[in-house]
Image (spheres, rainbow, N blue to C red):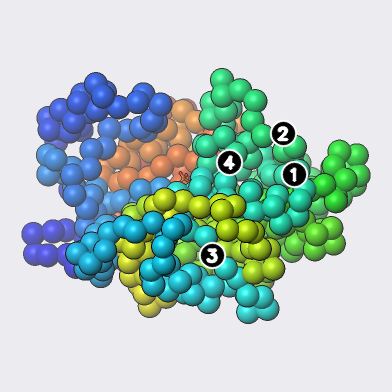
Amino acid sequence: MITATESKLPRINMALPGPKAKEVIEYDKKFISPSLFREYPLVAHRGYGAIIEDPDGNTFLDFAAGIAVCSTGHCHPHVVQAIQKQAAELIHIAGTDFYHRHMPQLAERLVATMPKSHHYKVFFGNSGTEAVEGAIKLARYATRRDKLIAFYGCFHGRTLGSLSLTASKSTQRKYFGTLLGGVEHIPFPYAYRCALGHTKETCGGEIIELLEEQILKRLFAPEEVAAIIVEPIQGEGGFIPAPAFFLQELQRICNKHGIMLILDEVQSGVGRTGKMWAYDHAGITPDMVLTAKGLGSGMPISAFIAKESVMQWKPGSHGSTYGGNPVCIASAMATLDLIEGGLMANAQKMGEYIFRKINDWPSRFKIVGDVRGKGLMIGVEIVRDQRTKEKAPDLRNNVIVGAFHRGLLTLESGENSIRISPPLIIDEEQADCAIGIMEESIREAEKSL
Ligand SMILES: Cc1ncc(COP(=O)(O)O)c(C=O)c1O
């Protein structure tokens, strides 16, 4: 709830970063690993609703949501209360060794979101990459096969197993040596750059053909392939949705060969696209679904949800000290109350509202090549020339940094796209404000053409 002294809209009082923010940045430089990539100098001091306040009293409208994590906004009272109550009762016990009611309670709620044709079971971890690691292990265990197929542009995490799947930016892999063997990447349907001129609904048929006629005939025998792992909307790769038919075709191929179909919904899940899972838009029945980010409203929690027939491993095969932490689960339960109690519907409504207002950006701005996405997972691709579609990461960065200085937080995505992923609580006034700031920033960036 926003109090009288708090605002719903941004207010920048000085040149950024202000003096107190600068102090934190210098402090950080002294002690924190330089591998972290900060796009602009935001220093967060507190958060409420869709607003972040910095230590100098500037307020920002947060359309990044901590990389799509703060699904219910910052410090939602229902979430805060649930965390506080649980923290006073039981903080940790290690679900890997002992029982507590919280794990099956959240698992039951997650299973209730899955297709009714199968029973599913859940394993809890702490981060997206852990969910991916666990899914790789379970797919190998369940199938006794080791080959994995992923997509160019995908991001599945930075630990060595998930990094073997990740094929987003070479910096993320450079100098980290030999990764998992038996991983093959194939193209992801990218309608805006489709060489065959297909649409957002039809792009990808040739990739399915490549998979069936080349990869599964010339490279991997299908009976050696454990899993195909796919983001229904590539997040880090540019907010690129896979067409429904494409996911349905992957399901058909997986069913045919006993390959696990793993949907990485770490970024796209928990109501962000207007449905609980982005794969719901395609009406498929995955073998495993991976979730993290938006599930905990900022508390570190992840899960992989697998068909019971798949999750048949023996005690000791997999575990986690912190996975299923009661406080994180309390946060996730409160998050699901809010998501199912209206925020998922708001994501759909506000997504449609924003799309109506920005769909015509490519005709209004020379540097906007494409606007795409679903619900509140919206990508804007920035190009130097609409005709050649030359990627313009520099202009994209100018737009993002320009928006920051005007009080709007967004993030980069892919080589030259902007990701718009606000908390699911936003209203029309906040959407209009963000659109206004984006338009000003795009106009400003265009001047450097
Ligand atoms: C689709 C997807 N999978 C996995 C991950 C890894 O999550 P984490 O950073 O929590 O390890 C991310 C993170 O951005 C992601 O977007």
For image coordinates 75% across by 44% down, the residue present is 146
Reading the image, the residue beneath label 4 is 162
Reading the image, the residue beneath label 3 is 122
Q: Secondary structure at mark 2?
A: loop
Estimate the x, y position of residue 32 in percent, counting from the top left: 30, 27
Q: CA distance from mark 1 to mark 2?
A: 9 Å
Number of marks in the rendered image: 4
* Cβ of mark 1 under 8 A from ligand 1: no
For image coordinates 46% across by 28% down, the residue present is 394
Estimate the x, y position of residue 327 in percent, counting from the top left: 30, 61
User: Of tags 1 and 4, which is closer to the observer?
Assistant: 1
Q: Secondary structure at mark 1?
A: loop
Q: CA distance from mark 2 to mark 4?
A: 12 Å
Whether residue 187 appears in this view of the structure is: no
Q: Is residue 145 left or right of residue 85?
A: right
Nearest the viewer among 115 and 430 is 115
Nearest the viewer among 217 and 202 is 217
Q: Earlier in the sequence, mark 1 or mark 2?
A: 1
Q: Amino acid at mark 1?
A: Asp
Q: Amino acid at mark 3?
A: Val
Q: CA distance from mark 2 to mark 3?
A: 27 Å
Within 10 Å of disc 2 (Cα), the crowding (few <14, some 14-19, many 20+) is few
Reading the image, the residue beneath label 1 is 146
Reading the image, the residue beneath label 2 is 181
Estimate the x, y position of residue 414 in percent, counting from the top left: 54, 38
Whether residue 419 appears in this view of the structure is: yes
For image coordinates 16% across by 58% down, the residue present is 7
User: Of tags 4 and 3, which is closer to the observer?
Assistant: 3
Instruction: Check if mark 1's residue and mark 2's residue have beta carbons within 8 Å.
Output: yes
Q: Amino acid at mark 2?
A: Gly
Within 10 Å of disc 4 (Cα), the crowding (few <14, some 14-19, many 20+) is many
Instruction: Check if mark 1's residue and mark 4's residue have beta carbons within 8 Å.
Output: no
